[in-house]
Image (cartoon, rainbow, N blue to C red):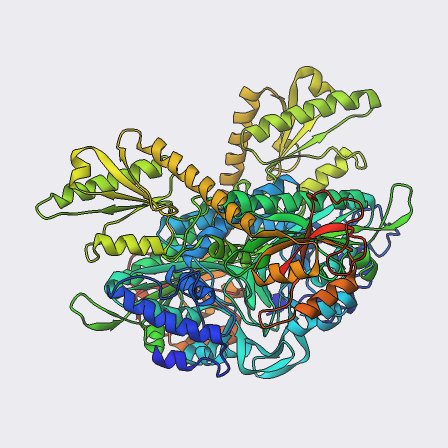
């Protein structure tokens, strides 16, 4: 293994080095040298995060910087989200398909603004076997340019519309800024939906329908509060008409994080790729298009929002194990009986559709197991010892609050279901309170700068001018990054007449969230 | 190798740029439409006939793929776009297998697509087998990379790299994982679904404490595949062991399921490898056993890919087009309403809608084709071409008699058509379910009969040559050397598909060498 580590590219970034250290320390853990994180969430957030995702067995760092291995603990969460989202979009009559990973250069170059946004991040296949390719071939950073030539081909008349496709796939963006597991990685998994309509109204409607699904994904599944809103001109998708997003916030770092985006592309791509149709009057018209995506980044946001100094905290709805049952043997107690009780409990819960598992390993102490499953963020732990057995009850310990209750075996399923629901709810409420506590309304530049220094999520009246946003960015550029707009929330507070932009002093047009971001 | 040619499409496939795309109205999809002046409003189907199965199997296959809207050619040579109707077949395959994998104790995970070239080099025969087909990334983010990266052709190397870090003791074993991913092999001769530069698959990887356990796992997974092929895809595959020559680069033993296509060529439809300790030795993947001794793990890997979709098309399709086994069909029943006069339309559509609701509620995948641009006859042909197992017709007479007409895709014309089936739930639902089951087993029976009538037992090389020249499969006793096997390949174009698990009893004499043989092998030309 030491040799393998040596294979790492010499220029490995800092995060990867940290990870290597973490990987080693996690190895030590397995030999019962005590569990636990060496960093705290408040103390050193970056290192804490690396440690949580590796020790929680979600991610493994890898020789190639910015590429991560997604372990079963992660993929189970991804699967749950997919099992929610995929049927929902199928109900909207969106079909699944698969377009190639490889893009030829001239297709990639077709939409100029678009490619300017992505070109610096493209990875190129230049060789096959022993020979050089005549023309290098790109690996998709996103699929607009791969898909739209086909839309042009498949769409003829208004009856071919709407064309609504989605694909689940990997994409590659070869960035050099600090890679962070889930949040910014060179390869990631996502869904990308691409739809074409006859009218702008239909496209507008769908943008919001999808955005609502993204909100539900975050709030109902990941228990992460998000703000729905529109991106500024500067921050919108390159080549699109407008971009909507759900924005989350990480209180510890004071950074916003773009959770998922739903873009209306307008007719720009239709023009470039000649996606035309004959309308009902027999006249040629261009389609209106949308594209929308969420990625494995969602999981990183969840970890950052809920994790604590003991490790991951997973919302019950997405956790691959919702209840972990641990047996607590005492001297002279009938271990077999306790183990049977544990297995029975797991069976009862599983039969009721609860994802429960027992950890009956003999070579680890109960205490070690408690720490282990806390590290992995399992929402509820059930302990069964001789006393519990005698009184026909089990002890349940919540991961989110650490509270312990004894629950009678009779009615176990109802109690556990109730607790899981409550954990889900509580996690969202707590996260929302924390986020809301960070929201700071600022009306002047001085207030803005102060709030930014305090890691606030800033809500400010803005004149909605691109130049002004650029200036704000330039003026706040510091070690920890420049502030920018996150979104203008759809739910706008009242903007009294005469309110001025915090930055330019011009009349404000709307309230906008500002902050540093991932 | 004739079948690997792509008659009318070779030129298209050779083009590596997007120059194909500027409004490609007269491109490959419409080659047969030369005389047609049809434009915008006319769908590409119907106007062009599918090349008959018997006349040119390859052209038939490509026609079915484009006209049934299963796939389209990708922008880069040898890649493909899987369209929703084709992808739905893959989703059905995934839905079934994903559950089976979990039931057998495997967890899903995801490994990066890029593998440092140095990893690939670690297992000698592996690098030898794969290096001509590797796609290499050397530039990323505008910079030359320090180490060239391989776009995964398969993941044994990266998996082993990680297993080495995750496995410490016997308690960490068995380690059983699976991933659904895309893989890349830079092939020269390509064919949609069957062989493309990039394809989708699942790859299972497991590590075990003992050789026996690994062998059991490899066999278990080939059984899962066999069962899937028979029960879901209605493809009577022959499970068996690959010859040394055909064994996976880096495996001790490769098990395979071999399917006979409509042109009687063989298709390797899934494989399961016993990797022995080859990768664990190359990567130092060791565990401490119960006595504290360090040992190398024993491993398996196994995969099924989108190639299987091609297998389904080529097993069941006929001159009318695609024929989907009901269990994998995304549309199991299509309802075609029929009306002549405007005043009939409403009541017919109402009835069609209520039939649709009844079937949908019963969990049957049903589609109502109520578009009024097409005649019922056109729709019949269209949905037959798309391979939908059952068609329900509802006309004004049917509405008044509260009944429907039901036609089977697998039995053409009158014999497959039944009139007067009540449209009431208690009658219709069980009837449709029963018919779907009948079609499912009838497709399998037909495929078994076809397969069995095209496998000929041979006892000499001359007989083998004769059988292969008739484009059939030859089955005969074999203990020949690797050189003998290559000679057969050179002289007849056939390879050993497998030593089938199902072996005939009695003494055997090798068809090539005349020595006593233990097993029969199956020889055939293949995709």
Where does residue A472 sit, x and y in percent of width and height?
71, 65
Residue B509 position (above or below residue A219): below
Where does residue B22 sit, x and y in percent of width and height?
82, 64
Please identify the quadrant where the C terminus of chain A is shown: bottom right
Where does residue B120 sit, x and y in percent of width and height?
46, 77
On screen, residue B369 versus residue B329, left or right, reads right
Please identify the quadrant where the N terminus of chain A is shown: bottom left
Toward the viewer: B359 or B296? B296
Residue sitting at 66 percent across and 59 percent down?
Answer: A448
Q: Can residue B262 be seen in this view?
A: no
- Residue A53: which quarter of the image? bottom left
- Residue B24: which quarter of the image? bottom right
Residue B273 position (above or below residue A368): below
Where does residue A403 sit, x and y in percent of width and height?
33, 43
Toward the viewer: A248 or A433? A433
Q: Is residue A148 visible?
A: yes
On screen, residue B98 versus residue B80, left or right, reads left
Toward the viewer: A38 or A150? A38
- Residue B311: which quarter of the image? bottom right
On screen, residue A411 versus residue B15, left or right, reads left
């Amino acid at each position: 293994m030491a040799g393998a580590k040596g294979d790492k590219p010499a220029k490995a970034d800092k995060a990867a080095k940290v990870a290597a250290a973490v990987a080693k320390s996690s190895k030590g853990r397995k030999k019962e040298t005590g569990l636990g994180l060496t960093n705290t969430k408040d103390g050193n957030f970056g290192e804490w995060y690396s440690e949580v995702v590796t020790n929680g067995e979600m991610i493994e760092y890898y020789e190639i910087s910015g590429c991560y291995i997604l372990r079963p603990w992660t993929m189970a969460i991804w699967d749950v989200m997919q099992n929610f989202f995929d049927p929902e979009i199928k109900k909207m009559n969106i079909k699944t398909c698969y377009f190639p990973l490889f893009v030829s250069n001239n297709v990639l170059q077709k939409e100029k603004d678009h490619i300017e946004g992505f070109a610096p991040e493209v990875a190129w296949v230049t060789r096959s076997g022993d020979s050089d390719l005549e023309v290098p071939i790109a690996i998709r950073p996103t699929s607009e340019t791969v898909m739209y030539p086909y839309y042009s081909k498949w769409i003829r008349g208004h009856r071919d519309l709407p064309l609504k496709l989605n694909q689940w796939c990997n994409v590659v963006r070869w960035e050099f800024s600090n890679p962070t597991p889930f949040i910014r990685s060179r390869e990631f998994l996502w869904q990308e939906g691409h739809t074409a309509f006859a009218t702008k109204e239909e496209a507008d409607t769908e943008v919001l329908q999808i955005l609502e699904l993204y909100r539900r994904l975050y709030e109902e599944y990941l228990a992460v509060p998000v703000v729905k809103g529109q991106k500024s001109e500067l921050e919108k998708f390159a080549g699109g008409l407008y971009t909507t997003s759900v924005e989350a916030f990480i209180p510890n770092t004071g950074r916003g994080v773009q959770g998922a985006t739903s873009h209306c592309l307008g007719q720009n791509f239709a023009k470039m790729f000649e996606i035309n149709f004959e309308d009902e009057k027999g006249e040629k018209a261009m389609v209106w298009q949308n594209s929308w995506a969420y990625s494995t980044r969602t999981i990183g946001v969840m970890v950052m929002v809920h994790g604590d100094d003991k490790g991951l905290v997973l919302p019950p709805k997405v956790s691959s194990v919702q209840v972990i049952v641990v047996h607590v043997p005492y001297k002279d107690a009938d271990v077999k009986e306790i183990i049977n009780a544990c297995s029975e409990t797991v069976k009862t819960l599983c039969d009721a559709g609860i994802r429960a598992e027992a950890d009956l390993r003999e070579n680890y102490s109960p205490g070690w197991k408690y720490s282990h499953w806390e590290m992995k963020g399992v929402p509820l732990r059930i302990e069964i010892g001789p006393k519990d057995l005698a009184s026909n009850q089990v002890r349940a310990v919540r991961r989110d609050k650490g509270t312990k209750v004894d629950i009678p075996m009779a009615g176990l399923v109802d109690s556990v279901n109730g607790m899981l629901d409550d954990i889900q709810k509580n996690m969202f409420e707590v996260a929302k309170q924390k986020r809301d506590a960070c929201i700071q309304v600022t009306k002047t530049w001085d207030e803005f700068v102060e709030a930014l220094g305090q890691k606030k999520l800033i809500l400010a009246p803005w004149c909605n001018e691109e130049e002004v946003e650029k200036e704000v960015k330039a003026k706040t550029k510091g070690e920890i990054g420049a502030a920018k707009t996150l979104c203008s929330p759809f739910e706008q507070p009242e903007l009294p007449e005469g309110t001025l932009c915090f930055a330019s002093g011009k009349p404000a047009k709307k309230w906008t969230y500002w902050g540093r971001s991932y | 190798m004739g079948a690997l040619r792509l008659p009318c499409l070779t030129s298209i496939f050779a083009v590596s740029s997007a120059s194909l795309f500027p409004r490609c109205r007269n491109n490959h999809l419409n080659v047969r439409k030369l005389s047609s002046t049809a434009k915008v409003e006319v769908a590409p189907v119907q106007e062009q006939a599918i090349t008959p199965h018997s006349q040119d199997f390859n052209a038939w296959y490509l026609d079915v793929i484009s006209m049934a809207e299963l796939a389209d050619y990708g922008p880069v040579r040898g890649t493909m776009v899987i369209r929703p109707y084709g992808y739905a077949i893959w989703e059905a395959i995934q839905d079934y297998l994903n559950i089976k994998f979990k039931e057998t104790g495997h967890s899903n995970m995801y490994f990066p697509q890029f593998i440092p070239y140095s990893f690939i080099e670690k297992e000698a025969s592996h690098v030898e087998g794969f290096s001509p087909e590797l796609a290499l990334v050397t530039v990323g983010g505008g910079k030359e990379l320090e180490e060239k990266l391989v776009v995964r052709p398969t993941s044994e190397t990266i998996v082993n790299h990680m297993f080495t870090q995750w496995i410490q003791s016997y308690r960490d074993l068995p380690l059983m994982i699976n991933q659904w991913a895309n893989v890349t092999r830079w092939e020269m001769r390509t064919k949609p679904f069957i062989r493309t530069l990039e394809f989708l698959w699942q790859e299972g990887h497991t590590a075990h404490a003992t050789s026996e356990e690994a062998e059991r796992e490899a066999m278990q997974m080939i059984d899962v595949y066999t069962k899937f092929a028979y029960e879901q895809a209605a493809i009577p595959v022959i499970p068996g062991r690959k010859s040394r020559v055909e064994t996976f680069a880096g495996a001790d033993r490769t098990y395979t399921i071999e399917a006979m296509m409509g042109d009687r060529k063989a298709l390797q439809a899934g494989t399961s490898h016993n990797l022995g300790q080859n990768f664990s030795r190359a990567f130092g993947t060791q565990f401490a056993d119960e006595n504290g001794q360090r040992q190398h793990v024993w491993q398996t890997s196994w995969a099924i890919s989108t190639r299987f979709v091609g297998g389904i098309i080529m097993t069941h399709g006929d001159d009318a087009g695609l024929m989907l086994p009901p269990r994998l069909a995304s549309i199991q029943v299509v309802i075609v309403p029929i009306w002549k006069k405007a005043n009939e339309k409403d009541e017919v559509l109402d009835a069609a809608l209520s039939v649709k609701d009844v079937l949908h509620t019963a969990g049957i995948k049903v589609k109502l084709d109520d578009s009024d641009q097409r005649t019922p006859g056109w729709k019949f042909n269209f949905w037959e071409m798309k391979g939908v197992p059952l068609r329900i017709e509802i006309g004004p007479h049917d509405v008044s008699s509260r009944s429907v007409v039901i036609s089977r895709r697998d039995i053409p014309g009158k014999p497959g058509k039944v009139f007067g089936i009540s449209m009431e739930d208690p009658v219709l639902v069980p009837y449709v379910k029963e018919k779907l089951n009948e079609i499912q087993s009838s497709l399998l029976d037909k495929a078994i009969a076809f397969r069995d009538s095209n496998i000929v037992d041979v006892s000499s090389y001359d007989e083998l040559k004769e059988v292969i020249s008739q484009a059939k499969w030859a089955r005969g006793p074999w203990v020949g050397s690797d050189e003998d096997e290559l000679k057969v390949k050179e002289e007849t174009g056939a390879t050993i598909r497998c030593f089938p698990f199902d072996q005939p009893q009695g003494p055997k004499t090798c068809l090539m060498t005349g020595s006593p043989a233990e097993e029969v092998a199956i020889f055939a030309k293949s995709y």
